[in-house]
Image (cartoon, helix red, strand yellow):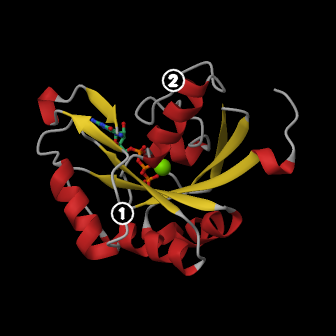
Amino acid sequence: MREYRGSEIRNIAVVGHGASGKTSLVDALAFVSGASKRHGSVKDGTALTDYSAEEIERGFSINLGCAFAEWMDSKINLIDTPGFLDFQGDAVAGVAAADGALCVVNATSGVEVGTEREFREAIRRKDPVLFVVSMMDKEHADFDRTYQQIKHRLTSKVIPVQIPAGQGASFQGVLNL
Ligand SMILES: Nc1nc2c(ncn2[C@@H]2O[C@H](COP(=O)(O)OP(=O)(O)OP(=O)(O)O)[C@@H](O)[C@H]2O)c(=O)[nH]1
Ligand SMILES: [Mg+2]
């Protein structure tokens, strides 16, 4: 890895409700960018940022985990935070350490209490927030419903930059607007 100047580094906290797909997304981003040579999985206990014995055994995040992606001359540090309320201290610390938040929202269950909690924490710190709608391949996934919930319950200042092509069984990928 090449050396990066401070101005080329971005620290992003990946936040959201428990089991919304944060750890899976971090692993996928590291893999797609080439920083990680293997596409890990939470289910198999091979996700980059769920590495402690207890996290692997239980299949959810307990501590902060850090991975990175090198993209367009920048190093993006991805701080994976735990979504369960019991570990909220680490999630708050992750947001505090970051320049911005990536808030993951599950397309089948929509905006949940953990989404709201972590979104408000990022906004309280005046951090920019990017939403990712996860689980688009699952039954009952609904992008429009999730987008409307974000708009009505979190912020009216939100605009799609990518939209899904299909949803549920017919999900094929995303379209860049
Ligand atoms: N079908 C499907 N399953 C997913 C997707 N993203 C994650 N999962 C699965 O959903 C479960 C939870 O994913 P995680 O990545 O552990 O979610 P998390 O937000 O990190 O969970 P916590 O760390 O507990 O907050 C795992 O079994 C994943 O394999 C997705 O886009 N589609
Ligand atoms: Mg996790």
Element marked by disc 2: loop
Question: Where residue 15 sits: x, y (%)?
Answer: 49, 59
| Residue 148 horizontal side relative to residue 176, left or right | left
- Residue topped by disc 1: 158
| Residue 43 horizontal side relative to residue 163, left or right | right
Q: Residue furthest top?
A: 37
Question: Where residue 131 sits: x, y (%)?
Answer: 41, 55
- In the rendered image, the quadrant that contains the N terminus is top right
What mark, if any, has residue 39 been given in the picture?
2
Q: Amino acid at mark 1?
A: Val
Q: Amino acid at mark 2?
A: His
Q: Residue furthest front?
A: 177
* Closer to the camera in the image, 54 or 111: 111
Q: Residue at x 62, y 18 (%)?
A: 37
In which quadrant of the rendered view does residue 148 lie? bottom left
Residue 47 is at least partly visible in this image:
no
Question: Where residue 47 sits: x, y (%)?
Answer: 53, 34
